[in-house]
Image: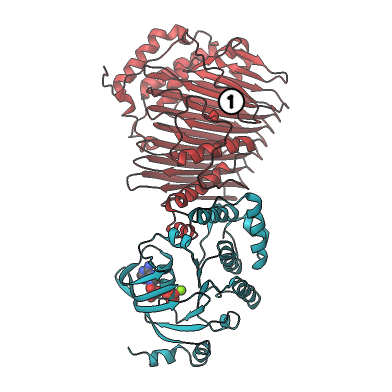
Chain colours: A red, B cyan
Amino acid sequence: METKYNDIIFKEKVVSLFEQNRAQIGANDTTRMSKERDVAFKQFKKVGFPNKKMEAWRNTNLKDVFAYNYNIQFSPADEKPELIEAFQCNIHNFDTQTITLYNGWYLSEDKHLITLPNGTIIGSLAQAIKEYPELVQKHYNKYTNIEENGLIALNTAFSQDGIFIYVPDNVKTYKTIQMVNILDKEDNLFIQNRNLIIVGKNAKLTILHCDDSYNYSRSFTNTVTEVFIDEGAEVDHYKLQNLNDNSTLINTTYFHQELQSKLTTNSITLNGGLIRNKINVVLNGEGGEANVFGVYLVDKEQHIDSQVFVDHAKANCNSDELFKGIIDDNATAVFNGHILVRKDSQHTNASQTNRNVQLTDKATVYTKPFLEIYADDVKCNHGATIGQLDEEALFYIKSRGIGDYDARLLLLYAFAAEVINKISIATLRESIDDLVKKRLRGELAICDQCVLQCKDQENTYEFKIDISKI
Amino acid sequence: MLKIKNLHVSINGKQILRGLNLEVNRGEVHAIMGPNGTGKSTLANVIAGKPGYHIDKGEIIFKGKNILELPPEVRAQEGIFLGFQYPVEIPGVSMTNFMRTAVNEHRKYKGLDPMPAGEFLKLMKEKQQLVEIHAKLTNRSVNEGFSGGEKKKNEIFQMAMLEPELAILDETDSGLDIDALKIVANGVNKLKTKDNATIVITHYQRLLDYIVPDFVHILFDGKIVKSGGKELALILEEKGYEWIKDESPN
Ligand SMILES: Nc1ncnc2c1ncn2[C@@H]1O[C@H](COP(=O)(O)OP(=O)(O)O)[C@@H](O)[C@H]1O
Ligand SMILES: [Mg+2]
C-alpha cells in the first residue's frame, strides 16, 4: 500500500521525525556539533527540499522521488548481514582495507574504529566523535555549506554515522581504503550518511568509494562527504556507483585543499535510478592541483547529474575537469561545471570538458559549462559537446570487416576509455575497464556481491571482439 | 571479378553517377582518372558500401554476386578493400587492436580460428616494413595525429594486413612527397598477385609512373567517357581535362 507523498508532505514528516528523535540523533555530539545540528535543522525547515525552481536543480526533479514513502532507521538494525565477507574486495593483486556502511550504519564484527600500524585511523564516524572529539570537531562541518541546498542542511541535521578516515602527517597509506555503501532493506529507506576524511601534511591516501545495491528495493540516499587535504598531501579518490534503477543517490563531496596538495577524483557511474554527484573543490593554497573526472553510462529511464564547482581561491593552482557520458534509451544526463577564479588567483590554469554521446532521440543531455573569472592572468578553457557516434568512423571500421554492433561498441568503449585510462592503479583500472565493457554490452547486473567482485573473477571480461592490449 | 553495369547513383537527390560501366579481372591494375567532383570517390564508396548513397539503377557484381545489398563489413570480408581519400581518425582505438579485430573477423568469416597473438605481432612487423611505417604508429590510436603521408601509408599497411582480392585506392597519392609516393607505390606493387586486382583512383598521372596500370579510364560527369592503356594517362597529362570535355558527347 503505497501512499502518494509530495515533497511538502515528506518535509513535514522528516521535520516531525527529527523533533521526536532529537535526543537519539545527537547522542554523541559535542556541544558545537549539537548547536550546528540545530542550526542546520532550522535551515532545512526554512528551505525544504530542492525543487525545479532553483537554478542548480532545474534539470533534476526530485518530484518522482517523493512520490514514495521512506523510512528512517535511527539506530542500526540488530541483525547483522552474513555478507560482510562477500564484500571484501578481491581484485587480483589489489590489496584493500575495506570499511562498510550497511544501510547507512558502520558495519563491523568487533571494533568500530581501528588504528593501522602506521597510525591511520579508520572506521565509524559516530565512534570517532566519541573517541577523538577534538580531531573530528576541527574539521567536521567546516567545509560544507548548509545554505547550498536543503539536502545539505538536512544531512547535517540528521546524520548519525558514516565513515571516518584520518591519515596522520607524512603517512602514505600503502593500501587502498575501500568504502562500501551497501543498501539491503525491503522497505524504502532514506539514508543520510556523513563521511569525514582528514589527510595530514604530506600524507597520501587512495580511496575507492563504492555505492552498491544488494537488491531491487527502493531507496533514497543523501550522502555528504568532507575531505580535508593538508599541505603537500595527495588524495586519489574513486567513486564507483552501481545501484539499482529504484535508487536515488544525492552525493555531495567537499574537497578542501591546502598548499601544494593534489587531488584526483574520478566518478564512475555504471547504473542507478537517479544519481546526482555534486563535487566541490576549494583550492585553498598555492600550487594545488585538482583533477576531477567522471564517466557515466546511463540507459532506460535513468538520470545522472554531475555538478562540479571548483573554487580557485588561491593563485598558481591547476584544475582539470573531464566528464564523459553515454546516454541511451530515455535516459537523461545533466552536467553543470562551474569554475570560479577569484580576483587574486593569478596564474590559474583551469580546464573543463564535458562530452556526451546521445544514442537515441529520446535520450536527453543538458550541459552547461560556466567560467567565472576575476583574475586577469589566467589560462582557462571549457568545452561541451553532445553528439552521436561518428558515422565516418563507423564506416571506416566496418570497411575493415568489423560488424555494426562491434564497431559501435569499439567506438563507445574508446569514448569512455579516455576517462578510465586516467585511473592510476593498474589493477583497479583493469577491473573498471571490464565493468565498463560489460556495461556497454548490457551484461552488467546489479551484482549480488561487491561491484568489483563480479562473479567470475578468474576470467577477466572480454569483448567477443578482442580489444584487450596485446 | 568485378562487373559494374549501368550504375546510376545519387546523393540527396543529386545525380552523381549516370550509367557507369566497368569490368575488372584478377591480376589487373586499373586507373580511374578525372577532374575533381566528377564522382570518383562516390564510385569507390559505393563499391565499399558506404551508407548515404542512393542507387538509382544498375548493379555491382563481385565474384559473381550482386553486392549492393551487403553491408560494408561483409563486402570487406568478401575481399574488397577501400583505401580512403581521407582516412578517419579514431581516438581511443589503438591501431594494433583495430587490426587484430579486423584480421580475426576476416578469419572468422573464412571459418578460421583467431590468429595467435605471437603470429599476429609477427605479421604486423612484416607488413610495417613493407610500407616503411614506424612501429610506434601502430601503438597509437587509429590515424590520430598522423601526418598526411603517414595516414596514406597506414591505408596501405591495412591493405597489406587484410590481403584483399580487390583494392580500391582513392587518391592514395594526394598530399604525398615523392619519397612517400614511391614507398606507397612500392607497397602496392609488392602486394600485387595474379589473383588480386587493384583500382587506383588518381587525379594526376604522376602515380602511374610507379604503379603501372593495365587500363586507364577517364571518369567525367558520372560516366566513363574513355578507356585505354597506360598511354591514355599521358595524353591526358599533356592535353588536360579540357580535352575530355570537348570529346565527351554531352
Ligand atoms: N554528401 C553529399 N551531398 C551532396 N553532394 C555530394 C556529397 N558528397 C559528394 N557530393 C558531390 O558529388 C560529386 C562527386 O563527388 P566525389 O565523388 O567526391 O568526386 P571526386 O572524388 O571525383 O572528386 C561532387 O559534385 C560533390 O560535390
Ligand atoms: Mg575524391
* Rendered view: B208 above or below A203: below
Residue B63 picture quarter: bottom left
> Which residue does the numbered mark 1 point to in the structure image?
A89
Q: Position of residue A21 (x, y in %)?
A: 41, 8
Residue at the (40%, 43%) spot, across then down: A327
Residue at the (48%, 60%) spot, across then down: B77
Q: Position of residue A264 (x, y in %)?
A: 60, 37
Tag 1: amino acid = Cys
Task: For mark 1, name the chain.
Answer: A
Q: Is residue A442 left or right of residue B119?
A: left
Residue at the (39%, 92%) spot, across then down: B247
Residue B189 picture quarter: bottom right
Residue sitting nearer the eye, B44 or A367: B44
* Rendered view: A412 above or below A182: below
Could you tell me how many numbered marks the image carries? 1
Q: Position of residue A217 (x, y in %)?
A: 38, 22
Identify the element where label 1 is drawn: loop
Residue at the (32%, 17%) spot, across then down: A12
Residue sitting nearer the eye, A386 or A166: A386
Mark 1 neighbour class, 10 Å CA radius: few under 14, some 14 to 19, many 20 or more: some
* Rendered view: A26 above or below A50: above
Q: Position of residue A314 (x, y in %)?
A: 61, 39
